[in-house]
Image: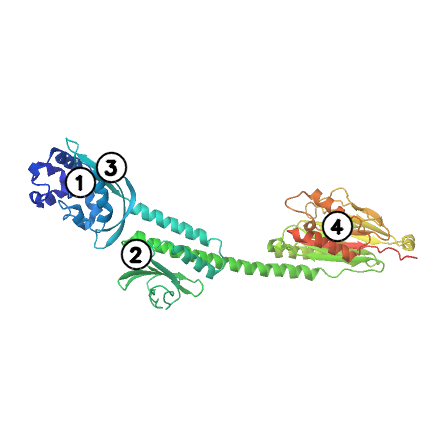
Amino acid sequence: MDELFEAAGTLRSAYRGVDWASTSLGAVSGWSRTLRAAVDVTLHTRFPVTLFWGAEFVMIYNEAYVELIGHKHPAALGAPAARVFPEIWDVIGPMLASVRSTRRATWTRDMRLLMDRHGYPEECFFTFSYSAARGPGGQVEGVIDIATETTAQVLSERRLILLAGLSDALSKLEEPAEILDRALQVLRTDPEDLPDVDILGMDAVGGAGRPPLPAVPSTIFQDGDVVVETFAEVPVMRVRLPGVPPSADTVLVARLSQHLPLDDGYLGFVRLVGATVTQALHRAQTRQAERRVAVLERDLSEHLQRSLLTPPAQPPGLEVAVRYQPASERARIGGDWYDSFLQPDGGLTLVIGDVAGHDQHAAATMAQIRNLLRGVAHAVEKPPGAVLEVLEATMRGLGVDALATAVLARVKQDEEQARAGARTLSWSNAGHLPPVLVSADGTAALLRTPPEMLLGVQAGVTRGDHRVTLTPGCAVVLYTDGLIDRRDAIIDDGLADLTRCLTGRQGSTAEQLCDLLLTRYAATSEDDIALVVLRIPPAPAG
């Protein structure tokens, strides 16, 4: 063997087996200096290189190139390229001819070729350059191909893009049927990896308009959740989607590509597809369960809330109207309450309050505080401030650990006031929003008082009392913060808007005032709303 081939390594025997004299290149001893130099460079590099020499583009290559052509070696060595690559000659033949005729190199990145290198037309990707090898006179003697296979990178990127798109498409869907339909839409955008794909129940067949996918026997998954079999000479992979609708035995069925090896990367990709769909379905099931629990919790909280908010006491000569509007969000229900009841001496007690927190826990705490306040206020003949002091001590003694705001008001009338139809409103405010007084002349003003601590913050707090005389035609509005407090506005703006809304409403009944306020504010509220409106009707005319 010519010493030129000593650097061929494991290919020495293959070079020795070629009858070079019978090729269009002729005997090695007669090769041109250009060819010998090109062969020397080719055999001394570890990068995949092949030479396409002469008019027939006879192939000479190194060890690294063998992996790129598979079983075409060793027959490819010394053979014309058209005979070695008949399946892709329509693509690379014109490229080689162009380099030979124009002397200009080509550059191709990630070219897809269906190459028969393992007994079937395999999807392969290559980045390569064809360059002219010129002799002393400038004539093109051959073409040098420097190549690298990028199949693994291209397939990985393609599959990652599909998985990411699938995950994104399913991330916000909550209906199982919609998830399955959308999954199939996405998966069918990758016919190279998934020539046909469906999601079926056990013993189901493929969809109309396509060749049927194989049925899925109920006993097929005896050894796991993945099965790969051949159906009509086509590989088919089935991935069970356990415990998801429409049945517990839903299966992803994929007809696999006949142009790709069934290696771990391919099969792992299909498994990930199944896992992504399964996760989306499980996520939807979890969300549906959470919604059902949320509805139950909301119903429970609202039912408990309403069961405690009894009809108000309506003593003669007064109008008392109440409203409770639950929040639209389950998480915002539970802490607001109102109350209206008579004292043993005939006086009227009004309460508006709000327990910190929400949901059924806040509703249960509200029930405790509401009932304690009722009992204390009924039993203790003291001003409102003193009643709140006793309430706070009772809460601590009974272990009611909660924070709450509240306004406790009492309405009484002495003999002189009775002749004029007037009343005295006395109240104490534990960190709550100020009531609004609508006077008989239509002016509306906040009954502001020095701020005091919430209930439950500190033991032994001394509570203040405040008084105002109510004349016929006056109204007092007690409310919780859900009426006016908004995320996009400061509370003072809400209070100012409330007084404007009530200004000039002296002619409205207590019920009409409640309806007015809910109509104006409830639609934009994110919290519970509780209202108590007390009104002294104007004296009859004449």
299 to 129, vertically: above or below = below
Do labels 1 and 2 touch, CB within 8 Å?
no
Which element type, helix, strand or loop, lies under badge 1?
Answer: strand
Mark 1–mark 2 Cα distance, whole angstroms, equals 32 Å
The quarter of the displayed image where residue 337 is located:
bottom right
| Residue at the outermost top position | 136
Of badges 4 and 1, the one in the foreground is: 1
Q: Say whether disc 3 or disc 1 marks the residue closer to the N-terminus.
A: 1
Q: Amino acid at mark 3?
A: Ala
180 to 462, vertically: above or below = below
Mark 4–mark 3 Cα distance, whole angstroms, equals 89 Å
Q: Is 260 situated left or right of 352 in this image? A: left
Q: Amino acid at mark 4?
A: Val
Can residue 25 be seen at all in this image of the molecule? yes
Q: Which mark is residue 51?
A: 1
Mark 3–mark 1 Cα distance, whole angstroms, equals 14 Å
Residue linked to disc 4: 407
Q: Say whether disc 1 or disc 2 marks the residue closer to the N-terminus.
A: 1
Mark 4–mark 1 Cα distance, whole angstroms, equals 95 Å
Q: Which mark is residue 78?
A: none
Q: Which mark is residue 257?
A: 2
Residue linked to disc 3: 105
For disc 4, the neighbor class at 10 Å (few under 14, some 14 to 19, many from 20) is: many
The one of 274 and 84 positioned closer to us in this rendering: 84
Where does residue 190 sit, x and y in percent of width and height?
A: 36, 53
